[in-house]
């Protein structure tokens, strides 16, 4: 890698690559350790199928 290259040089010429929307989340309940490992999430609110996530994404104006 050249000394004067910066990771931001490419972004300046082509614009934003993407952005993230992360809503504030409140902790309501958690899975027990075994269930969390099995489901891949400690929080039931974040345990979504790809179909459920797609509907939420489209409802918020995203393109899935």
Image (spheres, grey):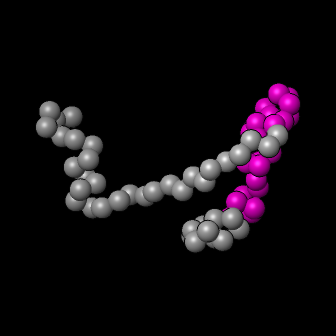
Was residue 37 drawn as part of the magenta stretch in this picture? yes
| Residue 1 visible to an observer of this rendering | yes
Q: Residue furthest left?
A: 4
Q: Quadrant of residue 51?
A: bottom right
Above or below: residue 45 compared with residue 56: above
As drawn, 1 above or below 56 = above
Principal secondary structure, stretch drawn in magenta: helix
Left or right: 27 in relation to 3: right
Q: How many marks?
A: 0
Give the residue at x 57% y 68%.
62
Which quarter of the image is occupied by the C terminus?
Answer: bottom right
Q: Residue at x 75, y 61 (%)?
A: 52
Residue 28, percent across and down?
80, 43
Q: Which one is in front, 3 or 57?
A: 57
Question: What segment is highlighted magenta in the picture?
Answer: 30-54
Q: Is residue 39 visible?
A: no
Q: Point out residue 61 in the picture as x, y percentages from the top left corner.
A: 58, 72
Q: Is residue 39 magenta?
A: yes
Residue at the (81%, 37%) spot, across then down: 30
Q: Quadrant of residue 60?
A: bottom right
Left or right: 32 as drawn, with respect to 50: right
Residue 26 as seen in the image, left or right of residue 62: right
Where does residue 8 sit, x and y in percent of width and height?
26, 47
Q: Which residue reaches farthest top?
A: 33
Percent from the top left, x then y, of residue 1? 21, 34
């Amino acid at each position: 890698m050249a000394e004067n290259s910066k990771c931001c040089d490419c972004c300046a010429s082509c614009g934003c690559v993407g952005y993230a929307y992360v809503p504030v989340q409140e902790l309501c309940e958690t899975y027990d350790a075994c269930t969390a490992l099995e489901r891949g999430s400690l929080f039931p609110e974040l345990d979504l199928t790809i179909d459920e996530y797609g509907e939420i994404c489209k409802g918020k104006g995203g393109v899935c």
